[in-house]
Image (cartoon, rainbow, N blue to C red):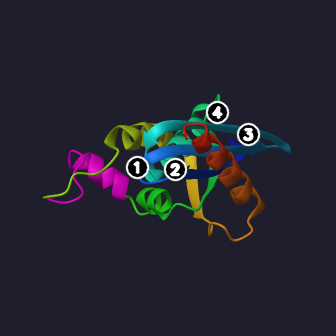
Amino acid sequence: MKQVEIFTDGACSGNPGPGGWGAILRYNGHEKEISGGEANTTNNRMELLAVISALKLLKEPCAVTLYSDSQYVCNSLKLGWAEKWRANNWMRNKKEKALNPELWAELLDLCAVHKVEPVWVRGHAGHPENERCDQMAVAESRKFM
């Protein structure tokens, strides 16, 4: 399997509000930057879309190290929360629905294709790729203001 690094970040002005996401894919010394946004969204949706959009670009199954400052994304994947939500018909517990089920379903399907290892990084702490992804995400969110 090819070893790929993916760095992602999402941003939202207000929550909900205009939002954006950014991602960097790195393979064998080559990098590709992608970004996008929505007029009315949430920070967590942007974090998820950054990961989904990056994984969708991979043309074959890959071993992916995913760097994100989103504990929501990292913990939900690493600790199996998202899989449990899906198994429980997108319920977090007996009373609370899981948020963003359509995005989680898409991400879990992509994780079934690729071997994804989430790595949490502290946001706004000088991590170069995280800072770049944040810049792209904020720039995308501003397109909707």
Question: Which disc number belongs to residue 47?
Answer: 2
Mark 3, Cα crowd under 10 Å, few <14 / some 14-19 / many 20+, is some
Magenta stretch containing residue 35, yes or no? no
Q: CA distance from mark 4 to mark 1?
A: 30 Å
Question: Which disc number belongs to residue 16?
Answer: 1
Secondary structure under tag 3 reads: strand
Three-letter code for the amino acid on which mark 1 is drawn: Pro
Three-letter code for the amino acid on which mark 3 is drawn: Glu
Res. 128 in view:
yes
For residue 38, side relative to residue 32 (left or right): left
**Start and end of the magenta stretch?**
81-94
Magenta stretch containing residue 89, yes or no? yes
Q: Which residue is mark 3?
A: 33
Front in this rendered view, residue 70 or 90: 70
Three-letter code for the amino acid on which mark 2 is drawn: Glu
Residue 15 quadrant: bottom left
Three-letter code for the amino acid on which mark 4 is drawn: Leu
Residue that extends furthest to the right in the rendered view of this protein:
29
Q: CA distance from mark 3 to mark 2?
A: 15 Å
Residue 125 in the image: state x and y as whole percent: 69, 71
Q: CA distance from mark 3 to mark 1?
A: 25 Å
Q: Which residue is mark 4?
A: 58
Numbered disc in front, either 3 or 1: 1
Front in this rendered view, residue 17 or 84: 17
